Amino acid sequence: MSTPDLLLWLRAHSTLWLDTVMGVTTYLGSDYFYLAALSFLYWCVDSLGTMRLFVLFLSSFYLGDAVKEITRLPRPFQVHPEIEPRFAETAEGFAFPSGHALQATVFWGWLAISFRKRWLYIAAPILALLIGFSRLYLGLHWPRDVLAGLVIGLAILGFAYVLMRVLASMPIRAHFPATLVFCLLPLLLFLLFPSHGGAQSMGALFGAILGQLLERQYIHFRVRGPAWQQLLKALIGLAGAFLLFFGLRALFDPLLPSREVIQVTPGTPAPAFRGFLYGRGYESLTFVRYALVGLWATLVAPALFRLFFGREEESGAAV
């Protein structure tokens, strides 16, 4: 059975309820889910440990998008119109590798490594595989895209695990305000590869790092607390995060060219490297938007929590 035939077979055996299940599953790999999950972990579980996951996850997002922009491979429904996509709004950009599969592997895999809980060791691969399968079922990716996403995600996890152990053994420690230099790295990476995904990931990482450094220096909000406090933090924090997320999109979208106009046709040769001036200066607004959301998550919302619920010198377990 050829790859197109496989996707057509999945479509032929689809049902309405399975469409819904796979749609919900694929949204577990969306920006909205990760924004909510990472923010909740930062506010209510462990702020310092979650920053490691912020850095790892957003770096993997950037790497995956860079590979997409270099390979520029089309999605199934762009090559075979008979493959009818569902939830196509979750399929921006090029096909290879699957960002959903890659990011699910990194996110759930790192949680399993960090918490060392049996249920997470079981849930992490199941969720990554289900999210990857949902991309096939919905006609949004080829099998090679999903497989590559899973493999790249595992490679990133292995590299990050070794790197964290090496860094933990190093005696050198940087101190504020010298640590603010770390904020330059996401900015430089965005200027190096200013794609849409690069603006999203490096903008969020820039804001998150800047906010976390300032929060650790001046605020020290209370991470742990009674259930009612954690619920209020989640409600207040997520309301502000999504208001900022969608509000800035509504504000900036009229200033940006149409995505249909600026999207390069899948399958065309990748252009030679031309840096920031290669027709992507408009993505600076995307960078600013995501940077402000990251800053909200790690600085502004924690400042509100400090005001409402008090100060805590140290957070608990590592993530």
Image (spheres, grey):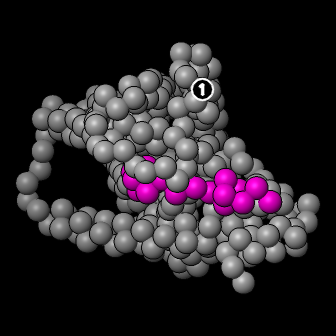
Q: Which residues are magenta?
A: 66-82
Residue at the far right in the pictured view: 16
Answer few, some or many: residues within 10 Å of disc 1's Cα (few below 14, many 20 plus, some between 14 and 19): few
Secondary structure under tag 1 reads loop
Q: Is residue 167 visible?
A: yes
Q: Is residue 120 visible?
A: no
Magenta stretch contains residue 77: yes
Q: Position of residue 2 (x, y in %)?
A: 69, 79
Q: Is residue 177 above or below residue 35?
A: above
Q: Is residue 300 above or below residue 5?
A: above
Q: Is residue 317 left or right of residue 263?
A: left
The residue nearer to you, when weighing 70 against 194, is 70
- Which quadrant of the rendered structure holds the C terminus? bottom left
Q: Position of residue 37 (x, y in %)?
A: 56, 49
Kind of residue at disc 1: Ser
Please give the name of the residue rendered at 87% of the width and 70% of the height, measured from the top-left corner.
12
The residue nearer to you, when weighing 249 against 3, is 3
Please give the name of the residue rendered at 58% of the width and 30% of the height, measured from the top-left corner.
261
Give the image quarter of residue 278. top left
Q: Position of residue 285 (x, y in %)?
A: 44, 23
Q: Which residue is mark 1?
A: 258
Please give the name of the residue rendered at 58% of the width and 55% of the height, measured from the top-left corner.
74
Magenta stretch contains residue 113: no
